[in-house]
Image (cartoon, rainbow, N blue to C red):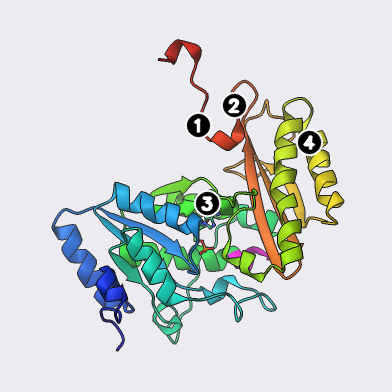
């Protein structure tokens, strides 16, 4: 059974699961012909509230909500966690159905990368820093991401595609790819969803032991410290303060850097514009990332609230 309604109870939940591009295209062509807008949420599954926030946005803003579910092998480097990446398709389908998703596209690897596949999408510059630094995951990681997202955008042809700011560099890379290749889609980037103690939700949090789970809270605490100090000192001093918080928990970050959110060029002063402060660290068995955005000088508001402060004259 290559492409069909999923077994109960998924079918009962009302979500349709397809595994082939052919069936996906046929269903979505009919939706498009009926004048219905399409929203796409690309995921690698093992859903948590971060994913669900994207699914709910697609459900609320588009007529047809599509989730892709594909652990993309080309974005994992040798020695990374492809084999052990957590998977639970049945639970994912239930959560997607509960969030109002209409269609899940969960192709096998051979459907995405058939024999003879030779073309990749490479976004320059942006993919060589932070996680793309050759000493870290390397630009190959983002080549895998850009290629699979380009394929998903071509297969689904959504009006809107939803991504999480948790993967801020990924958002910058995808926005650039869409602009450079004239892909007709609107990219929406939604806020990071966190556990009550601040840890950014991630499928990889499943790798953490109880002790490492506790230690991992230092990541968001460090970012809050960066935000606090940035209000009264230089970016360099605020990054230093963040590093001290990490060091107290014995964490040596892979990187903790301030960069322009779009160009990913280093930012040293908030008078130049806002800064993405991005962090990656290995905590036990999990390589985790997190980030925050520091607003440019003169536009400061509470960074965790996301929205610009309302001016007193607009209050009411
Ligand atoms: P993944 O399944 O890890 O590839 O993530 C699929 C999408 O969910 C990506 O756009 C991620 O940025 C987004 N995402 C993952 N974790 C979170 C989170 N904690 N908050 C918001 N979005 C997230």
- The quadrant in which residue 245 appears is top right
**How many C-alpha atoms fall within 10 Å of the one at disc 2: few (<14), some, or many (≥20)?**
some
Q: Disc 3, disc 2: CB below 8 Å?
A: no
Q: Disc 3, disc 4: CB below 8 Å?
A: no
**How many C-alpha atoms fall within 10 Å of the one at disc 4: few (<14), some, or many (≥20)?**
many
Q: Is residue 299 above or below residue 305?
A: above
Q: Is residue 131 above or below residue 109?
A: above
On screen, residue 82 versus residue 307, left or right, reads right
- The mark that comes first in sequence, 3 or 2, is 3
CA separation, marks 3 and 4?
Answer: 24 Å
CA separation, marks 2 and 1?
Answer: 8 Å
Rendered residue at 67%/78% (across/down): 78
In terms of depth relative to the viewer, which is nearer, 233 or 186? 233
CA separation, marks 3 and 1?
Answer: 19 Å
In terms of depth relative to the viewer, which is nearer, 33 or 19? 19
- The mark that comes first in sequence, 2 or 4, is 4
- The mark that comes first in sequence, 3 or 1, is 3
Is residue 4 visible in the rendered image? The answer is: yes
Q: Secondary structure at mark 1?
A: loop
Label 3 CB sits under 8 Å from any ligand 1 atom: yes
Mark carried by residue 171: 3
Mark carried by residue 307: 1
Name the residue beneath numbered marker 4.
Answer: 238
Q: Disc 2, disc 4: CB below 8 Å?
A: no
Q: Secondary structure at mark 4?
A: helix
Q: Is residue 245 magenta?
A: no
- The mark that comes first in sequence, 4 or 1, is 4
Name the residue beneath numbered marker 2.
Answer: 301
| Residue sticking out furthest to the top | 313
On screen, residue 286 versus residue 110, left or right, reads right
């Amino acid at each position: 059974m290559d492409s069909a309604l999923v077994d109960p109870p998924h079918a009962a939940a009302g979500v349709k699961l397809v595994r082939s591009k052919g069936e996906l295209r046929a269903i979505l062509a009919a939706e498009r012909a009926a004048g219905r807008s399409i929203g796409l949420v690309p995921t690698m599954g093992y859903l948590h509230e971060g994913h669900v926030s994207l699914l709910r946005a697609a459900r609320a803003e588009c007529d047809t909500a599509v989730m892709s579910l594909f652990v993309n092998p080309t974005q994992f480097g040798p020695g990374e966690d492809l084999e052990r990446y957590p998977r639970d398709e049945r639970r994912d389908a239930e959560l997607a159905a509960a969030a109002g998703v209409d269609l899940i596209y969960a192709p096998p690897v051979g459907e995405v990368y058939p024999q003879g596949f030779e073309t990749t999408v490479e976004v320059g510059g942006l993919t060589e820093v932070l996680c793309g630094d050759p000493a870290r995951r390397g630009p190959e990681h983002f080549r895998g991401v850009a290629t699979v997202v380009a394929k998903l955008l071509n297969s689904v042809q959504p009006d809107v595609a939803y991504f999480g700011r948790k993967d801020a560099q990924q958002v910058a890379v995808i926005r650039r790819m869409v602009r450079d290749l004239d892909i007709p889609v609107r990219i929406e980037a939604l806020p990071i969803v966190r556990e009550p103690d601040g840890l950014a939700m991630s499928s990889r949090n499943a790798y953490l032991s109880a002790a490492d789970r506790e230690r991992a809270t230092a990541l968001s605490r460090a970012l809050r410290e960066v935000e606090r100090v940035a209000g009264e000192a230089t970016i360099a001093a605020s990054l230093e303060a963040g590093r001290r918080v990490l060091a107290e928990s014995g964490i040596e970050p892979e990187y903790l850097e301030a960069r322009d959110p779009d160009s990913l060029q280093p930012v040293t002063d908030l008078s130049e514009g806002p800064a993405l402060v991005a962090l990656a660290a290995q905590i036990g068995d999990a390589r985790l990332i997190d980030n925050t955005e520091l607003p440019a000088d003169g536009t400061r508001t509470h960074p965790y609230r996301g929205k610009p402060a309302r001016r007193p004259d607009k209050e009411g």
